[in-house]
Each structure stands twice: as C-alpha cells, then as structure tokens.
C-alpha cells in the first residue's frame, strides 16, 4: 500500500514502505487527495533512529485493522523530521500548544489545508493508564470531523492563531535586518557573564552536566563556555570550569561509547549511565570539534590526553560507521538492533559480567582488574546487562590497562548484530562534521599525534561530496541518498552549516577553493533567507505550513540539539567579515546577534551558539594571517597562534604568492621565511617571525 515511500531518500520513510497503511510523503498531492475525498489528514512524524517510532509502527501501522481504518477515513502522511525540520517545527509547536509536551513519534491531525485541530505523540494499541488507544483517537477524530465540523474548524483556527502569534514573537526576537547606514550599533557583552552564572547554578553538583534526567550533551552551550572561558572577561573562569567538568564527565560516562568512540543522543538517567542508544551525526560532529578545542585549554595533562583520545576515536567512528560512498556522512545509527527477529534497544552495546569474562578469558589476572574499572551496577538494564562506562576518572595505569584490552571487547561486539543506519546525507550536519574533522586534525597535529593522518582527507572528501552532489546553480539541497540529491532546498541551517565547515577546512589547509565556496554560500544565504528585513529558516514555505502558522514567519533563533540557523548564519557572517573586511556583513551579523541580550538572560541553554558568536565578535574577532614558504616556521606560528587565540580566532594561511582572500593580501614574508600577522578588523600588529612574540601579541590584545 505504501509504494510511494519505497524510493524516498529517508530511511525512515522507506522503513514504512511495506506497511498496510497507504502512506503519502508530505506534499501538495497528499493534501489535494484529502480535499478530493473530504477527509482529514493524519501526519505521523518521526525519524529512523527513534525507538518509540518503531514501537508504534509495529503496534499500529503494521496492524491490518488499524491500517484499514486509516485508509478509509484519513489521508496518511509520513514525515521524517530530519529531512523536513520545517514540517516538524510547525506541527511540534501545535502539539505542544495542545498537550503541553512534545516528542516522537508525533501524531497530528489536520484539515486538508494543513491547519492542525488535534495532536499527540505516541498512542498505544490499547488504552493504558488513562491514555487512549490509537484506535480510540482515530474514531474520536473521525467522529468530530463528520459530526462536529464547526468545532473542528474553530479548533484549527485557534491553533493557527496561536502559532501565528509565536511567529510574531520570533520576528520581534530576531529583529529587523534593514540596517541603518551606521550599522547596528555597538555590541554589548554584559549579559554573557550573567548567562555563565545562570548556567553554573544549573550544573548537577553530583554527576556533572546540566539539570537532571534525561541528560543531554549541551553541545552549542559548551561551544560558548569554551569560547568565553578563553577570554579575560568576567566569569570566564567559571565558564571554563563548567566546560571542563562537563566534558570530562561525558567522556567517562555511558553517553560515550567506551569501546569504539561516538556519543549517544542522551542518557535517560541523571548519572549518565544508561543512554538512549541512537547515535546522531549532528551530536558527534559538534562534540568532535568541542573535544578538539578542549585539548588545547583543559587545565591538566590527563584531561588534554582524554580530549585527544575522544577526538581520535570519535573521528574514527565517523569514518567507520557513518561515511557513505563518495565521502558524505549518514545521519544516524538506530537505537534498536534486530536480534532473532525482534527489535531490542541497545542490544549491540550492553554486556553482562559473564559475557565480559568470556571475552577476557585470556587476560588472566587482569580480568578482575578490568571489571573493577567499570561501573556495572549504576544503570543496570532490566535483563541484567549494563553499558560499559567508568563514572570516574582513570589513573594513567588504569587507562593503559583499559586500552590494552579494549580492542578484544570491540572485536567481540563487532560480531554481534549491528544497528541499522539512516544513509541520507544532510547538508548542514555534514558541514558541522567537516568543521569537526578539520579542527580535530589540526588539534591532533599540534599535539604531535600521529592520529591526525587522514582526517583532513575525510573532511575534504565530505566537502567535495556536498559541492558535487548537493549544490547546483546556486541552490543547496538539504538531503541526498545514494549520491543523488532529492527533496527540498536546504534550510538556513544547511547553507550556514556547510559554510561553517568550509571555512574551517580553509583555516586548516589554506586551500582557497574552500574559502571561495563558503563565500558563495554565505552570499546565497543572504539573498535567499532575508525577506523584507526578516530572516527566515526556509527559502520556500509550502501553502500547508503557511496556513498552519499564519502568513507571518521568521527564523527561530533558539538552539536545540543543533545550533539554530540564525546563530549559524551569524557565525559565518562574522567569520566572512573577518576574512573579507566586509563591514556590511559584519553589521548584518551584529543585527542578528541582538536577540542574545534577551536569550542569554532568560534561557542561556537555548542560546549557546549565538552567545559564542557574540563572544567571538566582541574579541574582534582576532584574525591570524600566516604567510611564507618556510613550512616548519609556518606550522610553528600557526600552532602558537591557535593555542593563544582560543577557539574563536580566524586563521588564514598563504603558502604561495597569489591569494583571493582579502585578509591575506599584502601580508608578505621574506623569501625562505614566514611571518604571522595578528589583526583585528584588518588592522594588524607588527608581523611576528617568532612564535613567542606572537603569543605575547595575543596577550597584549586581550589585556
């Protein structure tokens, strides 16, 4: 029945291709069919790695009687929230307005014009603890549609008005981008110290991280804490300390895969012991980069070594588990593993003591010592199995013991059934992965590690894939599958995220093709996502989404697990202005950052990326241009500048005499030598030929 889904780019949609439900992908054809039949639309939103999405699919969408009822009384639409975050955002807002909560799977009922009149999340096949069964919901909705159409219309109008009001709020928060001739006015960072103190008060004093269960990696916020912690501003020490504790705790916890590398989406418990086992590209791309940055700033040698190890292993995990043919990276690994025909959450990753002892039989007296390293009690699963985590720091000799036997455990785990992979390539997330790989390669090289070999090649191949497969005639596609782009145009987060990765790759390599491609994307985003002085998340909005939330719209500047498109765009504008000297793009970035004054004070955990960009902008940002043909001295100067400059320093290098990067123009070096120019707003200090002199210049600018 669901043949329309069989050739979709989304693995989530393809998973439902054999359902007896007559699914449609989201689009005008589905809503036209609902108008033709005069029936409501049922929209089911989820994603491939979602455990409860699989549960509801098995219980309801694979059930013949339920499918027959859906097919008779509804047009059913299946949506991958990762492929269509624009759809997900609108209907999640409606679901939260109706129920006070949200989540996936999300179940939404709309008029044929797209307006919501009823919504919820997971519904069980039978009534459970006061929750109606899915069949009861369907019957109630169908009855209301048939017998009380005026109530349905009134509900739809009320919800649409509520969502329109929220869009007006976003517009006020983002502000106008119609810049006055003098720019947007001076930036203020006074609120950032308050944001740091607020975050510090939310730190879990016992288990680390922020808040209680469930516990997520606060990736965009950690970017801010690391950036702000590298400055001399008020509360910088507090920011750095919170980042240090959170990053170390996560690296030793059940959130992190201690055998292979890579982070799960979140843990269900406060102690970071039991993960929700899906692994997402967007989490690991951000965390790879964060640990690379932390390897420079962590206060102890053990922490710096831990950061380098996590960077190394997470990059290797990306290459092993998520890389697709052609060089892009897939979206996720599933939370579930198919074992003996049954989906079991986390089955690949958990162990009993007996299983561990069996694998470690050859370790002799070391077996008990290895088991003693692991916290197998905290977060034990119902079947007695546990994730492998430590819950504490390891002494150097303990870490050496673990590293000695870790390959044996991983080899045994690799022989188990493995979770499915969602092979769709998402442009913006791949941009974040490129940035993570580029920064990790540089951090590892600066630390003298041989583990950086190949990481820049992985970043180059992913960048080439995006430009070759996703980018055509000035338009960036959001997703591709099997080397072919399909579906909607990229969102603001895709254009800005890809540019972020390309700028990072240019900074790491000095290869100007990446700078020029990033510049093109920044200019394209400016043209496509700013309309009548307002920033939009989408370049083209469907009629159904416009009806669902009113004609007024604006970008949502608040971060989720990924940085908002608005924050990413502000960041690449600041970087581009630093490279190009464009005062107009600098002013545009500053206008976009005006919302930080409200977000930092009231909801700092939702404004991390924008606060990091504001911090970078307040610092200048500092610009480092290194030129010359002495490769040893060039690398020494770059290493010194990256270490002293912190995560926000904008780096450019010129191995030859010609350049298309304005920051590098006129920055000459003697033949056979090298010079470093430390600049702010294109105004540079005296060129430095000695790394220590360059470090002193950084200190002088920040004193």
Image (tube, rainbow, N blue to C red):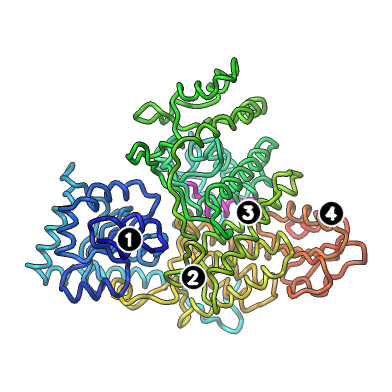
Q: CA distance from mark 4 to mark 3?
A: 25 Å
Residue 418 vs residue 166, the one in the foreground? 418
Q: Name the residue tied to disc 3.
A: 437
Most common secondary structure along the magenta stretch:
helix
Which secondary structure, mark 1?
helix
Q: Earlier in the sequence, mark 2 or mark 4?
A: 2
Q: Is residue 231 above or below residue 314?
A: below
Q: Name the residue tied to disc 1.
A: 92
Q: Position of residue 228 (x, y in %)?
A: 61, 54
Q: Are marks 3 and 2 in contact (CB under 8 Å)?
A: no
Which circle, 3 or 1, is nearer the viewer? 3
Q: Is residue 16 left or right of residue 234?
A: left
Which circle, 2 or 4, is nearer the viewer? 2
Q: Which residues are magenta?
A: 217-230
The extreme left residue here reads: 147
Q: Is residue 227 magenta?
A: yes
Q: CA distance from mark 3 to mark 1?
A: 32 Å
Which secondary structure, mark 4?
helix
Q: Name the residue tied to disc 2.
A: 477
Crowding at dot 4, Cα within 10 Å, few <14 / some 14-19 / many 20+, comes out as many
Which circle, 3 or 2, is nearer the viewer? 2
Q: Earlier in the sequence, mark 2 or mark 1?
A: 1
């Amino acid at each position: 029945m669901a043949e329309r889904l069989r050739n979709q780019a989304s693995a989530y949609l393809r998973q439902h291709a054999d359902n007896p439900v007559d699914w449609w992908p989201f689009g005008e054809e589905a809503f036209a069919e609902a108008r033709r039949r005069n029936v409501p639309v049922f929209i089911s939103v989820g994603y491939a790695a979602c455990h409860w999405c699989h549960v509801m699919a098995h219980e309801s969408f694979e059930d013949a009687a339920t499918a027959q009822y859906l097919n008779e009384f509804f047009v059913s639409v299946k949506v991958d929230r990762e492929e269509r975050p624009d759809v997900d955002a609108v209907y999640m807002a409606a679901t939260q307005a109706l129920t006070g909560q949200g989540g996936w799977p999300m179940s939404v009922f709309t008029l044929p014009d797209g307006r919501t009149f009823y919504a919820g999340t997971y519904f069980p096949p039978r009534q459970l603890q006061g929750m109606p069964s899915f069949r009861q919901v369907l019957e109630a909705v169908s009855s209301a549609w048939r017998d009380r159409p005026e109530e349905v219309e009134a509900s739809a109008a009320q919800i649409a008005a509520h969502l329109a009001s929220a869009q007006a709020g976003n517009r006020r928060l983002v502000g106008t981008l119609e810049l006055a001739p003098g720019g947007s006015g001076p930036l203020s960072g006074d609120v950032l110290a308050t944001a740091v103190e607020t975050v510090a008060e939310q730190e879990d004093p016992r288990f680390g991280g922020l808040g209680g269960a469930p516990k997520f990696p606060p990736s965009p916020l950690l970017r801010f804490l690391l950036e702000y912690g590298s400055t001399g501003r008020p509360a910088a020490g507090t920011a750095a300390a919170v980042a240090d504790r959170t990053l170390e705790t996560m690296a030793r916890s059940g959130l992190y895969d201690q055998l292979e590398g890579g982070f799960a989406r979140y843990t269900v418990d406060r102690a970071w012991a039991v993960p929700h086992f899906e692994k997402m590209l967007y989490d690991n791309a951000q965390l790879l980069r964060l640990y690379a940055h932390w390897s420079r700033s962590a206060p102890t040698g053990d922490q710096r070594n831990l950061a380098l190890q996590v960077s190394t292993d997470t990059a290797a995990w990306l290459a092993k588990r998520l890389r697709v043919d052609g060089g892009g990276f897939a979206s996720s690994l599933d939370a579930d593993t198919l074992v003996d025909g049954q989906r079991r959450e986390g089955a690949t990753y958990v162990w009993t003591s007996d299983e561990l002892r069996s694998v470690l039989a050859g370790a002799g007296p070391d077996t008990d010592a290895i088991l003693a390293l692991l916290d197998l009690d905290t977060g034990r699963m119902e079947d007695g199995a546990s994730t492998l985590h430590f819950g504490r720091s390891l002494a150097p000799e303990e870490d050496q013991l673990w590293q000695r036997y870790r390959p044996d455990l991983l080899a045994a785990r690799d022989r188990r059934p493995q979770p499915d992979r969602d092979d769709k390539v998402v442009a913006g997330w791949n941009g974040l992965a490129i940035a993570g790989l580029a920064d990790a390669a540089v951090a590892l090289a600066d630390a003298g590690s041989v583990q950086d070999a190949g990481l820049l090649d992985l970043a180059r191949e992913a960048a080439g894939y995006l430009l070759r497969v996703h980018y055509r005639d000035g338009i960036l596609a959001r997703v591709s599958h099997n080397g072919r782009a399909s579906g909607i145009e990229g969102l603001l987060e895709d254009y800005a995220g890809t540019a972020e990765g390309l700028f990072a790759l240019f900074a790491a390599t000095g290869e100007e093709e990446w700078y020029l491609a990033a510049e093109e994307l920044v200019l394209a985003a400016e043209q496509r996502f700013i309309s009548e002085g307002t920033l939009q998340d989408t370049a083209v909005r469907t009629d159904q989404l416009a009806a669902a939330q009113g004609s007024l719209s604006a970008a949502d500047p608040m971060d989720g697990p990924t940085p908002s498109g608005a924050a990413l765009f502000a960041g690449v504008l600041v970087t581009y202005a630093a490279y190009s000297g464009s005062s107009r793009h600098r002013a545009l970035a500053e206008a976009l950052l005006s919302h930080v004054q409200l977000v930092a004070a009231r909801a700092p955990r939702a404004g991390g990326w924008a606060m990091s960009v504001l911090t970078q902008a307040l610092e200048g940002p500092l610009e480092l241009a290194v030129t010359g043909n002495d490769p040893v001295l060039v690398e020494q100067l770059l290493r010194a500048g990256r270490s002293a400059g912190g995560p926000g320093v904008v780096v450019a290098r010129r191995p030859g005499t010609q350049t298309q990067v304005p920051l590098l123009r006129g920055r000459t070096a003697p033949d056979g030598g090298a010079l470093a120019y430390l600049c702010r707003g294109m105004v540079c200090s005296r060129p430095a030929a000695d790394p220590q002199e360059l470090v002193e210049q950084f200190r002088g600018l920040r004193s």
